[in-house]
Amino acid sequence: MSKHNNTLPDHILYISYDGMTDPLGQSQVIPYLIGLCKAGYTFSLLSCEKKDRLQKNEQHIRKLLAPYPIQWHPIPYTPSPPILAKYWDLHQLKKTACQIYETQPFAMTHCRSYVPTDIGLQLKKKYGTKLFFDMRGFWVDERVDGGLWNLRNPIYKIAYWRYKQKEAQYLQQADMTISLTHAGIQEMKTWDSYQEGQRLEMIQCSTDFDLFQLHTPQKREAARKQLGLAPNELIFAYLGNIGTWYMLDEMLQFFKQAKQSYPNAQFLFLTHETPATIYGYLSKYQLNPSDFVITFAARQEVATLMAAADIGLFFIKPAYSKISSSPTKLGELLAMGMPVICNAGVGDVREIIQATNSGMALEKFDATSFQQVINQIPQLLQKDGANIRQKAIENYSLQKAIGRYVQLYKEVLSYEG
């Protein structure tokens, strides 16, 4: 094992397979790094970027990062072929990480999810750097639960088996493992790969409460005017992309049933998806496109436009791997003081909804369950938004999460084992 004598004790390599030009990078990576910089850390940031988004947003990201000691190293994300593309990206990530170390040695690698952790583990063996495994979710099982890896295909079966082995190595050799949920930690402790004494800590997805401020009647009126929505109609809203985990069919079924009680109800989608993606589902449920407003919103615009809504609505596939999920959109909706209709069986969602008294988490996706929630809509509309927001701060404060990372960074970097 080789190791530089001039390793910088407060310099961290942060590796993300998600791009900084993606919405997720801007909401769940950059704000944390900025906060950690203010606590005295410096970063080399290595990320995989989708070509079109990099072309569109690179200068914006560089402007965001410019005031802070963050050196960004974007590399191209390879979309295909499946599996092989991942290995090419891994090769590129490792090559770049080693180049960074030779010019600006780092004391620790903070790895966001599984693919970067493969690099972090190799760097630990090569240079003796600490490994901070920010697992984000049960990535291997997500591939299967989301239908991305069909285990009847021998290639995916081998990939699944190999990555389950790697998952065990990550847990056993990481100096710290972060789960997004309490439920995820409890599940990991039942795994054969778990060994007593391994450090497992919970830091869930946080929310920028400065950006997602409490919605007010004035903000509601302005947003509806901007979006062309009537001032007195019931507006449901969905925030984020549609795909793999998000149950569009069930959300549309719920909306159709809600319209029997609220004929003028409308559904607002703030999403990167093209409107045609959603419109293609409407005929299946005899829904009218005029009842939908589907638009893109940049991160800085999301809270402004979401203020048009009365109730946030999202359903997530409650698969095994979702035990470890912390939906970013939930924290953002609660920060605005907005009541929420969602479902249980995903991370700590049910417990958070109960703790914040912010809405309802369905156990089933059937007409009876939908009607029980629809019957409660008048009560949901009467909830105190300021109270929801205040309770949400206890769960989702960005500053609290950054403080926890600082605490765990210090612990890992001072440990000589």
Image (cartoon, rainbow, N blue to C red):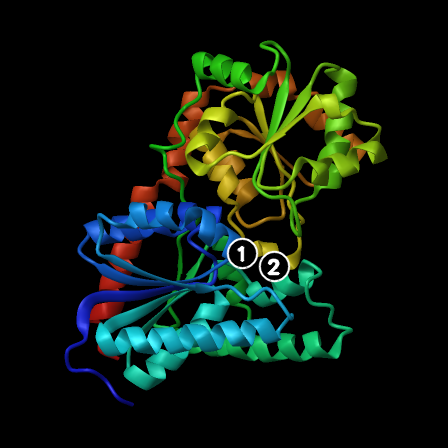
In percent of the image, x 62 and y 21: which residue is there? 235
Which amino acid type corresponds to the residue marked 2 in the rendered image?
Answer: Ser
Q: Which residue is mark 1?
A: 324
How crowded is the residue under tag 1: few (<14 C-alpha within 10 Å), some, or many (20+)? many
- Tag 1, which secondary structure? helix
In 3D space, how far apart are the residues under numbered discs 1 and 2 (Cα atoms)? 6 Å
- Tag 2, which secondary structure? helix
In percent of the image, x 24 and y 71: which residue is there? 106
List the single residue furthest toward the top.
232
Q: Is residue 46 left or right of residue 225?
A: left
Which amino acid type corresponds to the residue marked 1 in the rendered image?
Answer: Ser
Q: Position of residue 32 (x, y in %)?
A: 33, 50
List the single residue furthest toward the bottom.
1
Q: Are marks 1 and 2 in contact (CB under 8 Å)?
A: yes
List the single residue furthest toward the front.
55
Q: Is residue 9 left or right of residue 331?
A: left
Q: Is residue 102 left or right of residue 176?
A: left
Q: Which residue is mark 2?
A: 321
Q: Which quarter of the picture shows residue 406?
A: bottom left
Foreground: 184 or 135?
135
In percent of the image, x 44 and y 21: which residue is there? 215
Q: Is residue 365 visible?
A: no
Q: Is residue 278 above or below residue 18?
A: above
Q: Which quarter of the picture shows residue 160?
A: bottom right
In percent of the image, x 45 and y 56: which residue is there? 19
Q: Position of residue 78 (x, y in %)?
A: 55, 66
